[in-house]
Amino acid sequence: MTGMSGSGEAWSALLPEAFLLLGAVGGLLLGLWTPQQRQWRVRVLVTVACLASAVSAALALPDPAQRVFEGTWVVDTTTGVVRVVVALGVAALVWLAAPSVAGHPRETEAYVLMLLGALGTVALAASGDLLLLVAAYLLASVPLYALAGFAKDSAGTEATMKYYLMGAFVGVLLLVGVAALVLASGTTGYSELAALLPESSPVLLAVGVLGVLAGVAFKAGAVPVHFWVPDVTAGTTPPMAAYLTTIPKIGAVAAAFRLLAEPFADLPLDVPLLVAVIAAASMTLGNLAAFAQTDVLRLLAYSTVSQVGYLFMVVAVAARTDLAVPALAIYLAAYAVTNIGAFAAVVATPAARTITDWATAAAQHRWLVVSLVICLLGLVGTPPTAVFVGKLAVFAAAWDGAMPWLVVVAAVNTVASLFYYLRWIAPAFVGVPVAAATAEGSVGTGARTAAGTAQTVQRVPVVVLHAAAAMSILLGVGAGLWLGAV
Amino acid sequence: MLLTVVIFLPLVAAGVLLAAPRLGGRAAVGVWVAASALDLALIGWMWWRFDPGDGASGLVDGLAYEADLQWIPTVDAGYHVGVDGLSLPLLALTGVLFLACAVYSLREPDRPRTYAALFLFLQTACLGTFASLDLILFFVFFDLTIVGMYFVIAGWGHGNARRSALKFFLYTFVGSLALLVGFIGLFLGSEERTFDMVALAANPPLADSPVAGGLVLLAIGLGLAVKTPLFPFHTWLPDAHTDAPAAGSAVLAGILLKLGTYGFVRIAMPILPDAWQRWAMVAVVVGVISVLWGAFVALAQTDVKRMIAYTSVNHMGYVLLGLGAAGLVASADEGARTVATVGAMYQMVSHGLLTGALFLLSGWLWSRGHSYAFDRWGGLARPAPVFAACLAVAAFGSLGLPGFSSFIAEFQVFTGALQAAPVATVIAVLGILVTAGLFLLTLQRLLTGDTVAPEEPDAGQETDAGQVQEDPAPARAGGGTAVAAETRQTTRIRDLRANEVVAIVPLLALAVVLGLFPRVLLDVLEPAAMAVVELVAR
């Protein structure tokens, strides 16, 4: 909070974003002059841009927090972590998507859109101004609509339609909310809002808070605006599902965190309680809905809804405890790694859609199962994985922020979540008896589909899965090393 | 450093096993045996070099082999391990029992490499839990034991293994999360905001807020009670035991249950002394109910393994009775409370050895007849004399006959608890009578009378297995010397194999040694128990 900086300094503060933008524009141009079969060049360029962005963001992490461009763009620990995680996540996701888009007529466009969505996500996390928040919301939404329907099949089109309509509707709510807050205070900057909002009319405040929170909750996929998550996840291709359920969520949660920490910190309304209720509802409904899923993608979709619930716990106590910022950083990174890993397991067996299919396909690949078990147990929060450290930090922060009831709700939900993750782990580990395939269907692991019986396992996604599993454990065991850097 | 090697040596061996897919099954189990033996030797070396001290020492001072590294700096959790008189006997018990399981599983036919790797992983988790001096580290290892045991039951169990494994995982996971919530409560309630047990025990958190202290103790107690298990949280235990493989059951009963009771001595009592004193009577009552419930329900079982499982509930009840009595500061002097605590600790070691042996012996029933039902077996003393002898020794040990370790343990628990809680103690003595009766009944049903054995399910021949020939083969006269040809004989029951004898007899021998020469263990236990009693009395 060092006030405004000169424009020379300001540009250098945006170096990581500049790399992402350069990567997107450069990739588009390169793609135009590259033959159809050699589009992997674009993939390499995009990866390099992501890595450059991540490195420059990591180097900037220890710097003191600053607000550039008249306070609209905040560069602090939260932004820094989001930059690194998003850039590295997109780099991994580009490779995860490679097998399914390689040779596709619009291959370049896919990579470029992924980069632009990442840019929007970082903008969400960094915005210190309501209008920038709206712009970031659009930048993190529009490319994603195109990505969701990238395959142009009927399921993908339906998913895109739902995603788009819901996004447009919530976008209007967001605009209404921003308008109400501007009416109430006459300003859009977070710092001024924090000072002016507490004295404003409660009705305008309520409308404003609800609208703005609806916007970020939609991007995060939190209850009650989570309906797009399972449909889009199951409708689009698995790598795009991994992207849609990982990248925008990171930015949205960071944006919600910043809102709660700054403009909404001292309102006459109990905003933290509202967010806590959203968190509790997300984790509970996400878990309950995941119980009966037999489709691995829908199961993971609902699991991401419940994960957002845990993330919103720390959002609720953003202004109340010093433990909140590190907890958010840990959990965001841990969630991104683990979720990408779990989706990579699905991408690796492209024809397997049900749990039984997956178990059959992975039966001959012991290490695939081991890595999947690590990722899924990681999502539960089993030590020593990264999500465990994240959960520990989040629980401690929530309790310290005077919400012990939320910790109890989250603990109960963690146990509940174990149940459906085990429904996937058990057949994968023990194996599916051939004769019992129909019986398996009756107990809910899903029938074996015709496509699922003859399976190949793809190489690149498997590498991503193993890397994610290893990262998950390394981030957990080595928490002291990298947290010291943050 | 030595302690770290001891903890992670099995894990490294497990990694080696997983990374070497060419390794044959027998070689893999050989690696397992070697790693466990080496680990046990290192633990023996640690015991040899361990100086228990003269007066009260343990936890807040007198820690040996300490190592302390930062892990999660934002919440001050670290890799802090160390050994004192409380943890050393349990580390040794872990080493002994896992080695016994390794030897016992030499002929494991089903995916032996993964099996060995899982058990080695489990051993690291158990050793780590006992050595932890940091709440989060304790929780990490505690949770990993659940994960490891889940895969053992789900992958190698029989009967309704998947369902039992799921029940076990969910049930104990509830407990472990309650534990985590309690730990976070301790962290936030402490002045210096730390998860370090030594710091917390030196300066107990929540001392001036009885309600918060009580609630945190409730959360921790709930978590540990599920694991121990105490009435009414024991219902996962019989299913998990019945469907687990024999070695899995032995580890589950012998080691994993101790994680719960150890948590009471290590965490609940020294770190929440106020709350423990206030609620000690609850621990006594729950302990006595577990004693009686376990004994009477065991009496009603028709399945050998379920019966042994319920006697575990009974035996863990004595531990809680002793620990609860140690908290009744107002009504007993320090000497009596120390005796009760020592008895409780002694019972943990003794139960680990005897129940481990009993479960390994029950594995014999499954491997020979695929049944644990009492009414399918009878008169086994004649065809399987070594089995019969081992079972008799284990049963007499478990019922608390003088000369066995459990006698020393239960005698001390009752002596120590009598002054503080006379009524509860007298009621609990009833439990001994019932267990004595049920173990004698077991011996009578299984060993005496006409020889009865279930038909071999895999032989599929028309031979009548109900009437077994009476002449024990001369080849087995030496007590199960290794027989080369492994032909399934439907008319004869094969006695314990050599590797099974080598696994089981040392456990029983140790139980006798600890019953005849208790000073070996008491020298280590007593100073630590005195320290705990002093910490509780603050």
Image (cartoon, coloured by chain):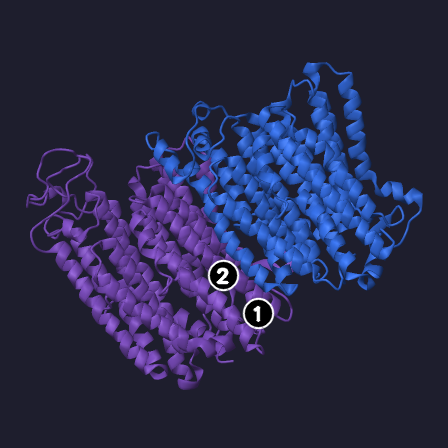
Chain colours: A blue, B purple
Amino acid carrying label 2: it is Ala
Amino acid carrying label 1: it is Leu
Q: Is residue B367 left or right of residue A477?
A: left
- Identify which residue, B104 or A124, lies in the foreground: A124
Where does residue A147 sit, x and y in percent of width and height? Answer: 67, 29
- The image quadrant of residue A225 is top right
Please give the name of the residue rendered at 64% of the width and 21% of the height, measured from the top-left corner.
Answer: A102
Where does residue B309 sit, x and y in percent of width and height? Answer: 29, 58
Where does residue B61 sit, x and y in percent of width and height? Answer: 53, 71
- Identify which residue, A178 or B105, lies in the foreground: A178
Mark on residue B178?
Answer: 2
Point out the image quarter for the N terminus of chain A: bottom right
Using a 10 Å C-alpha cutoff, classify the residue at mark 2 as few (fewer than 14 neighbours), some (14 to 19) or many (20 or more).
Answer: many
- The image quadrant of residue A239 is top right
Tag nearer the camera, 2 or 1: 2
Q: Secondary structure at mark 2?
A: helix
**Label 1 sits on residue:** B200
| Earlier residue among tags 2 and 1 | 2
Q: Secondary structure at mark 1?
A: helix
